[in-house]
Amino acid sequence: MGDRQHKNALFDQFARVGKALASGKRLELLDLLAQGERDVASLAAAADLGMTSASAHLQTLRQANLVTTRRDGTRVLYSLAGCDVADLFARLRDVAQSHLPDVEAARAAYLGADGGQPVTRDELHRLARSAAVTVLDVRPREEYAAGHIPGAVSIPLDELAARLAELSPDGRIVAYCRGAYCVLAHDAVRLLQAHGRDATRLTDGMLEWRLADLPVAA
């Protein structure tokens, strides 16, 4: 039999990751970093955090080796420590969705409803290679630049209303954003449909696209 003290020490190491994940804001930061590396100021703004709070949350994630840093001049850029961290985050969401009834209510309240039948990753991968559909990335520019679905057009959601003329009035538009629990694509579809466009969205987003090992352009 193994030594109890050593077993306790082993499981305490596992718990370090669990403790680092035990914060909604830290999970949101992982969600943002799954799109690409960012500095503290960008992360703080996107997660609606003060700089001090964002730095403290990132330090907790770094102590658990879930994120890494590199210097770019005077900036410190954060990124996920590996694709397994993105996969862990995605699996955590799925387990919560499966076992916590409150998750579905929170999801519905946040994302709302939009018309049209969402398309799957496989369907979009096939459609993106044809001229029958416009693939629309509505994430912020820096996230698009870090990696996007090949052939996708970048129009951030906050610019979409003013740039509708850039999209063909004919044909279908498929919008996507960060992932299955990102509201940006839902809002884009509602806006496009209100202007008479044939629009739908990807069932999930860039996080799941990457985890499925589908092509990514940068």
Image (spheres, helix red, strand yellow):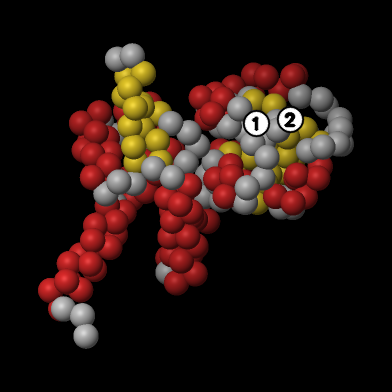
The answer to which quarter of the image holds residue 158 is top right
Which label lies toward us, 2 or 1? 1
Q: So how many labels did they put on this image?
A: 2
Look at mark 2 in the image and give the residue it sits on: 151
Q: Quadrant of residue 197?
A: top right
**In the rendering, at what x and y percent does residue 54 appear?**
27, 35
Apparent side of residue 41 relative to residue 205 in the rendered image (left or right): left
Type of amino acid at the residue the image marks with label 1: Ala
Q: Amino acid at mark 2?
A: Gly
Q: Nearer the viewer, residue 41 or 126?
A: 126
Q: Residues within 10 Å of mark 1 (few under 14, many from 20)?
A: few
Label 2 to label 1: alpha-carbon separation: 8 Å
Q: Residues within 10 Å of mark 2 (few under 14, many from 20)?
A: some
Tell me residue 120's x, y (percent).
Answer: 71, 52
At x 30%, y 46%, the residue is 65
Identified at 58% across, 32% down, the residue is 147
Pointer 2 with pointer 1, Cβ within 8 A: yes
- Give the quadrant of the C terminus: top right
Labelled disc at residue 9: none
Q: Residue at x 33, y 22 (%)?
A: 71
Residue 75: percent from left, percent from top: 32, 19
**Which mark is drawn over residue 217?**
1
